[in-house]
Image: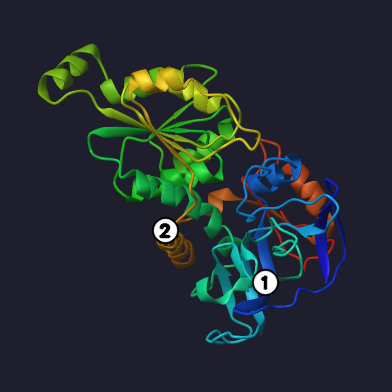
Amino acid sequence: MRAAVLRGGTVEARVVADPVPGPGQLLVRSLACGICASDLHFMDHLDAGVDDDSGMSTYDPDVDIVMGHEYCAEVVDYGPDTARRIPVGTRVSSLPVLATPTGRKIIGQNPESPGGFGEYFLITEAITRVVASDLPSEVVCVADAISVGWSAASRAQVTTSEVPLVIGCGAIARSAIAQLRRLGVGPIVAVDFVASRRATALAMGADVVVDPAEISPFQAWRDVAYGSAESMRELMALAGLPGCVVFECVGIPGVLDSIIKGCERGTRIYSVGGPPEGDHLHTLTAKRKGLNIQFGGGPSMDHWDEAFEAVCSGSLDVTPLLGRTIGLDEVADGLAAARDANGPVRIIVTPSAQGRTTA
């Protein structure tokens, strides 16, 4: 098969061996696969997982790796010990985790679990979901990205006495905003330096967007949550001030620490970003403020299913997130373009579109 292959820190399109489905696995043909910031983090930080002994994500610079974990695919064949409940030719997707004899692997982040930047790859039958939709595969493949922010927003269980503050307005942040809006939470304050991202955050459900170059995100949050001095006095007299729930969706060193130092006492923080190279945190400040920090964790299967259904049914419009479509020969350029904060949130790879680019 042809695939955009990562090796030695660079990506090139070439012919590699077709994957062979093992027990409980399906062989699928990639129809569309989104380029995610996690792909960039994976290829840029060789030692990021050196202390992670789970084996789920392994980067060997001397071995071919086919990335791509946000996919819509078509069933081609079945491995041994499969129920074969999904007919060949059916469009499917799944949580990007492959069950193998040596343990669970993140699809697109292991030599053993090639991803959607190739013509064919493998998925776990037990967690495969059928695409019950006529929407294009380029839309459906965004569901996995949606599930991450969706899950964080759902797990946060923001109450009516709390006001959420979303730091960063990439795909994960905007999916968190969309789910907060669906849950009836608000007002939602979203922060990003890039005007186009702030505009899309509004389209996904944010009430107030903030340019941190113009005002502190925390002052902007106070202005929304507390309002005027008179309103603040009334709130204190009646039921206390609103609480703050921060969703950190940036993944750059220093951002989480700046939240710890700038946020209100008692703030709950959901750190979804997580810089691969790690970070330094003022834990004493966090302790004195009584902060509660939840680090990532990824979407639960239930939350993944919810997000997938919302995208496939069209009840959640993800078109504001979509950029251009590229073929395998353009993946290296697409990855470079994905580094641009002013670029589209999702560039979609369609392996069948060799040498073709559409706007």
Q: Is residue 35 above or below residue 116?
A: above
Q: Secondary structure at mark 1?
A: strand
Task: Identify which amino acid the numbered label 1 is placed on.
Answer: Leu
Of all residues, the one furthest to the left in this rendering is 238
Residue 319 coordinates in the image, percent (x, y): 55, 54
Q: Earlier in the sequence, mark 1 or mark 2?
A: 1
Q: Is residue 264 visible?
A: no
- Residue, disc 2: 303
- 80 relative to 217 in the view: left or right: right
At a point 56% along the width and 76% down the height, the residue shown is 125
Q: Are marks 1 and 2 in contact (CB under 8 Å)?
A: no
Name the image quarter holding residue 197: top right
Work out whether residue 120 can be spotted. Answer: yes
Figure check: 209 above or below 202: above
Amino acid type assigned to the residue bearing label 2 in the image? His
**Colour theme:** rainbow
Q: Name the residue tied to disc 1.
A: 122
